[in-house]
Amino acid sequence: MTGQTPPPTIKRILVIFNPKSGSGDNTVLQCAAKLREAGCDVQERELEKDIPVTEYLKDVRAYDTVIAAGGDGTVSSVAYAMRYTNVPLLAYPAGTANLIALNLELPEDPSRLAEIVLAAHAVRIDLGELKVGDQTHGFAMLAGAGADASMIRESEELKPKFGALAYAMSAMRQVNPKKTTFHMTVDGEERSAEGIGVMIANFGKANFGLPITSDISPSDGRFTVVVLRAGNVFQLLPNLIDSVRSKLNLGDPMFGSGNIETFEATEIHVQSDEPFPLQYDGELHVETTPFSAKVLPGAIRFVTPARTATLKT
């Protein structure tokens, strides 16, 4: 018959969740229930120790959207396993800091997140690929060696009690961090710098929405590399103030950038005179420097209510 309205297409949603993330009160199942009420076909898969994330995603192209619920490490590992499949991914905030969700301007309310999934707006975002020895990992937010990895390590014991504040508290403990000379190959060119850490940033907002530095875009096919030259975290506060002023369009920098050095890269190899600890999206690596990282342009489509232009710092 002609003139009839075709039946609505049923959205197929895959939910992958880490039950151990955050404080354990994962609300993603409430979000899944809301999606079922809206007529979606929702499948749930709980992550288990020692089973690779890729095992949960073998049939990923059969779904309209994937929801990854957990900390930033869980979200980025799912994103990396899904790279270039073109299936949209929701970074469900179920961890302690949830920096990927924060950068994507996602709320925490499960009903609102269900509405965002149903709206089906997604932006194409770069991913990073980190190589250390014979191991390869993906990251969406940030990878780094030195002070930031030490901060994350010290925050582990504080997170159960203080949540996201644990990162700020551990940062305050970095009064006298180790310093070394980093030897870097940046897109084929050699350069060296002395400092307390190197960060490879894809997104630009850290805890509490504070900008890491200005002019970081997750969709430009490049990393922003930040070398922390300052002797301790307190000496970096003027740079943070300048970054906030830049974000708010409050005029020229007040302090200058002597405590940090920033530059762009699509591929970088980092060695250091002393072995420094590594982290990628909040996950501590058992290995130390050297490491390599390269950008994977537009590798994942993240579900978000935001537009691409608003995701830059």
Image: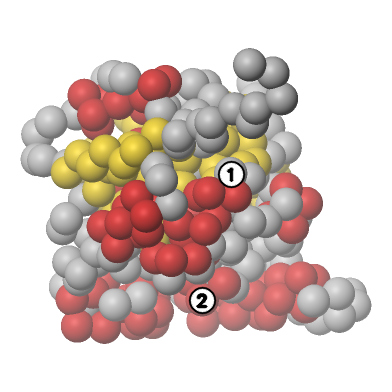
Q: Quadrant of the N terminus?
A: top right
Residue of label 1: 120
Q: Nearer the viewer, residue 195 or 98?
A: 98
The residue at the far top in this view is 1
Where does residue 67 sit, x and y in percent of width and height?
A: 38, 45
Left or right: 143 in relation to 313: left
Crowding near the residue tagged with mark 2, few <14, some 14–19, many ≥20 C-alpha atoms within 10 Å: few
Q: Please name which of the two marks, 2 or 1, marks the residue nearer to the observer.
A: 1
- Residue 194 placed where, x, y %? 53, 53
Q: Quick check: 194 above or below 42?
A: below
Residue 31 in view, yes or no = yes
| Residue hosting label 2 | 208
Q: Residue at x 17, y 44 (%)?
A: 46
Q: CA distance from mark 2 to mark 1?
A: 26 Å
Is 155 left, or right, of 13 in this rendering? left
Characterize the local packing of mark 1: few (<14), some (14-19) or many (20 or more) Cα atoms within 10 angstroms: some
**Amino acid type, residue under disc 2 in the picture:** Phe
Residue 159 lies in quadrant? bottom left
Q: Nearer the viewer, residue 84 or 34?
A: 34
Q: Earlier in the sequence, mark 2 or mark 1?
A: 1
> Is label 2 in a helix, a strand or a loop?
helix
Question: In the image, which disc is placed on residue 192?
Answer: none
